[in-house]
Image (cartoon, rainbow, N blue to C red):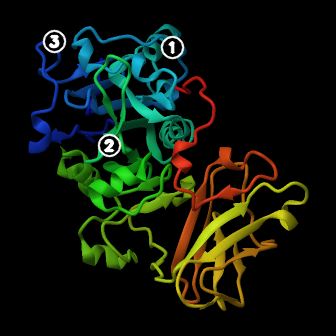
Amino acid sequence: MAYDIGFLGGGVRAPLPGFGPALEGEIVRSEQLRDGVYADYPTFTVVMNARRRSPAFVALNIHQRKLGGEGSRSWSYDTRLDHELQLDDDYYRRNVWDRGHMAMRASAAWGDTRAERNRNSRETFYWTNSVLQHQWLNRDEWVGVENWVRTLEQDDNDRVCSISGPIYGDVNTYVEPQARTPAPVPGAFFKVVMFRHRDTPDALSVRAFIVPQNAATMRASGQWRMADLQTYQVPVRLIEQYTNLVFPQEVVQANPLYYEDVEGAARVGVPSLPEIREVDADTNIVDPGQQRAVEEQSPAPVRILAAMVNPAGAEAAGEWVSIANIGAATISLAGWKLRDHAGRECGLEGTLEAGTARRIQPVASMRLTNRANGSITLLDDHARRVDRAHWKREESSREGETVVFLMPDRFEAPPAQADDPG
């Protein structure tokens, strides 16, 4: 078995991407691989990048009704490929980097029998299926996207295909094990999800995502204003831009987000292109034809500094948000609002002098969740976005501790090392 482009059935194809000129020469080729390129496993297929020593992409078939395998978590080399092309445990030991599955174990472990499901679970533990992934991202944002795919409810027949892989920037962080060649750390990860939608089962449906783990790396390569450890829904063309993969037109056109179609974007209220949507919950994922809420960017120099997301004592009375004016002039806050992840709002008033901060308390009309990832958006009197802050569930788990947003080393302060979630 291997990734099957006809897996969705009904004549609907979920094709693999090709390679652009800049990527073509980096792809691992061997007579031991199918067509000299494809490393096949029971439910997925890997294409390796020799220069990065990581997958260029991993394509996975998921049969939702047949999931449930278990197996040992013992990582090993794929003997069809040179060991030096596979980043082994030396690169993951005693650091913040998890062995990030590109074909998620829980999604690949399906089959008709228990033995088959367990075998397919074990087959995900090859170094060819692993990428350096920050433990915060691997255990939260990335697994959140993975779980959305694995439990997708919009599909027509419980069959889903996904193509995942790393994105590298022009300026990368490196892991340097002793006496080993340094390995670059991806700046982000992508996932293209393909299925037959229950409302349009005769056509291909596509949703695509980018999850950055180092926004500085991504900005250096694309000038994209992104937050670390945040999920974004994107056009497939944007993934092509960052990876040099080339997806067939049927995949590009089935994606609901816009890359360069100005007229089409205007019809659904997209204010700028390419369209990039933050995803804090499944309900934020955009479907074809869905009208977008227009949210222009405000030039006001006000930033969200910090928040008390999990106060000791009464939640409603103890929650607060701190904002700061980093500009040179006093700003009126009349008509301004704070908005939580669920759309609930808290009105502001008064003025904020240059160089000063203010704590907004209480924010009783809002709820700053500490049971899941959350966000706060600051809007001006024209309903334009001034700033947005995003936090992870782990950051708000300790009662009475402030979550700080304007802190340059948030990405570099991981929790204690733990087992990979798979």
Cα gap from disc 1 to disc 3, whole angstroms: 25 Å
Task: Give the mark nearer the N terminus: 3 vs 2.
Answer: 3
Kindly state the secondary structure of the residue where label 3 is placed: loop
Residue 364's place in the image compared with 401, above or below, is: below
**Within-10-Å neighbours for mark 1: few <14, some 14–19, many 20+:** some
In this rendering, which labeled residue sits more in front, label 1 or label 2? 2
| Kind of residue at disc 2 | Asn
Residue 64 spot, x, y in % from top left: 49, 31
Task: Give the mark nearer the N terminus: 1 vs 2.
Answer: 1
Kindly state the secondary structure of the residue where label 1 is placed: loop
Task: Give the mark nearer the N terminus: 1 vs 3.
Answer: 3
Q: Between residues 332 and 159, which one lies in front from this camera angle? A: 332
Q: Are marks 1 and 2 in contact (CB under 8 Å)?
A: no
- For label 3, the residue is 32
Q: Which residue is drawn at 40% across and 77% down?
A: 269
Which quadrant does the N terminus fall into? top left
Cα gap from disc 1 to disc 2, whole angstroms: 29 Å
| Kind of residue at disc 1 | Arg
Cα gap from disc 3 to disc 2, whole angstroms: 31 Å
Kindly state the secondary structure of the residue where label 2 is placed: loop
Q: Are marks 1 and 3 in contact (CB under 8 Å)?
A: no
**Within-10-Å neighbours for mark 3: few <14, some 14–19, many 20+:** few
Q: Between residues 32 and 216, which one lies in front from this camera angle? A: 216
| Kind of residue at disc 3 | Gln
- Residue 73: numbered disc: 1
Residue 282 spot, x, y in % from top left: 55, 53
Count of labels shown? 3
